[in-house]
Image: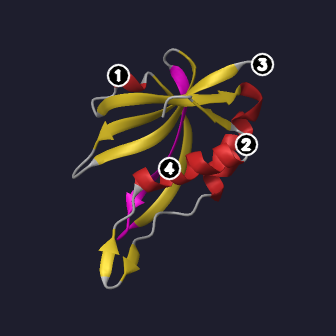
Amino acid sequence: MATYKLYIAQFTSMPVFHDVIYIEADPGRGWMYHVIGSHGLGWVNEAKQRNKIEDSRQFYKKYLKGTVAQTDLHRVDEICRSISMPQNLYKAGVEFRRDCRHWVRDALCRMEQQGVFKPNKER
């Protein structure tokens, strides 16, 4: 069964890094799944083909997290679209800010639970 590599890719963004799920079909060719926006303006889910992410001026680094079967790529898109947009949590009067990084983690967890994402043995 053919598989694609799944990465968490980071891009520089003020004031913190912006994390995305990047699935690479071949070196330099793949798909990016992420949320863009903010708590004030609102979040939007975005999925698009994105080639040569390393050529972006904002690209920082990518971390290989595991694989996705080529036949499950459509399920990745469905799962990513089903993940809730980041919402800050409030506990005992303390605000816990959630952002794109939390959305990526939630999406990977759901993909793993549904058998779509196979994580590397070394976590």
Secondary structure mostly seen in magenta is strand
76 displayed left or right of 35: right
Tally the marks.
4
On residue 55, the disc is 1
Counting other residues with Cα less than 10 Å from the Cα at mark 1, is it few (<14), some (14-19), or many (20 or more)?
few
Mark 1: amino acid: Asp
Look at the numbered disc 2 and give the secondary structure of its residue.
helix
Give the residue at x 55% y 26%: 30
On residue 105, the disc is 4
**Residue 24 position in % (x across, y down):** 55, 24
Q: From this viewpoint, which residue is outermost toward the top? A: 27
Give the alpha-carbon distance from disc 3 to disc 1, as whole Å.
Answer: 30 Å
76 displayed left or right of 96: right
Task: Confirm whether the magenta stretch covers residue 75.
Answer: no
Give the residue at x 77% y 29%: 71
On residue 1, the disc is 3
Give the residue at x 51% y 14%: 27
Give the alpha-carbon distance from disc 1 to disc 2, as whole Å.
Answer: 28 Å
Give the alpha-carbon distance from disc 2 to disc 4, as whole Å.
Answer: 17 Å
- The foreground one among 72 and 47 is 72
